[in-house]
Image: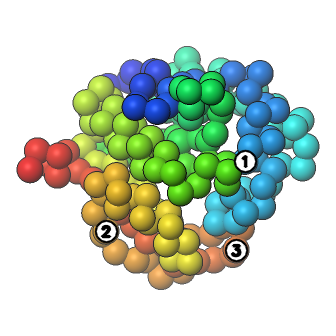
Amino acid sequence: MNKVGTRTIETERMILRRFKIEDAQEMFDGWCNDPEVTRFLTWAPHGSVEVTKMLLNDWVPRYENGDYFNWGMELKEIGKLIGNISVVQVREDIGEALIGYCMSRAYWGNGYMPEALKAVMDYLFDVAGMNRVVATHDVNNPKSGRVMDKAGMKYEGTLRQASLNMQGICDSVYHSMIRSDREK
C-alpha cells in the first residue's frame, strides 16, 4: 500500500475532498441528523451540530496520516456537500480497503454514490496501490448493494448475523472488486 492519504478526486459532477471543521453545519443538516440515512449504519443520528463538530475535530487531524482516506462529496455545480465516502478499515497484509458511505437523502437515486464509489476505487487501486476493495450492506438495504453493482463490484456472499448496525444484529452482504477485475 502506498501511504498517499486523502487527495482531491474530481468526477464528472463532484469534487471529492477532505473535510474541514467548517463543514459541520452542512453535514449535520444534510445527513448526520437524519435517522433514515443512518438507519442501516453503525452510528446514530447526531443530536446536535456540536456532535458533528466533535467528529470533524477527530477526522481533520488524521489527514496527516498517509493511511487515512475520507472524502466529502461536493457537487461541482452548486458547491454543496452532499455525503461522505471513506475507507473504514485497511488490511495492509493483503492490500484490502473496506469502504463505507452515506449521503443526504435529498440526493438519493441520482447516481452520485456509484460515481463517487467508482472514483474512490480507481484512486485506491491506481494511487494507493490496493489489491482489493470491499463494501458491505445490511441484507435489508438492497439499494446500497445496487450502488456497489453499478460501480462494478461483484457479489461475494452473505454472512449470516455477521454485522451490527442501528437495526441490531444483521446479515451482511459482501461485494468486492480486485485489481485483476479491472484488467479484464
Dot 3 lies on which element?
loop
The mark lying in front, picked from 3 and 1, is 1
Residue plotted at (74% across, 43% down)? 30
- The residue that mark 3 highlights is 167
Q: Reading the chain from its start, which is encountered first: label 2 or label 1?
A: 1
Query: Mark 2 and mark 1: span between their CA atoms?
Result: 27 Å
- The residue that mark 1 highlights is 31
Residue plotted at (51% across, 77% down)? 139
Question: Which amino acid type is marked by label 1?
Answer: Trp
Question: Which amino acid type is marked by label 3?
Answer: Gln
Query: Mark 2 and mark 3: span between their CA atoms?
Result: 23 Å
Dot 1 lies on which element?
helix
Residue plotted at (63% across, 25% down)? 79
Looking at the image, which is closer to me, 29 or 58? 29
Residue 31 visible in the displayed image: yes
- The residue that mark 2 highlights is 155
Q: Percent from the top left, x then y, of residue 34?
A: 78, 55
Q: Label 1 neighbourhood size at 10 Å, few (<14), some (14-19), many (20+)?
A: many
Residue 55 location, quadrant: top right
Q: Percent from the top left, x then y, of residue 142?
A: 49, 72
The image shows a total of numbered marks equal to 3
Q: Label 2 neighbourhood size at 10 Å, few (<14), some (14-19), many (20+)?
A: some
Q: Reading the chain from its start, which is encountered first: label 3 or label 1?
A: 1
> Measured along the vertical axis of the image, is residue 157 above or below residue 47?
below
Query: Mark 3 and mark 1: span between their CA atoms?
Result: 18 Å
Q: Percent from the top left, x then y, of residue 37?
A: 69, 58
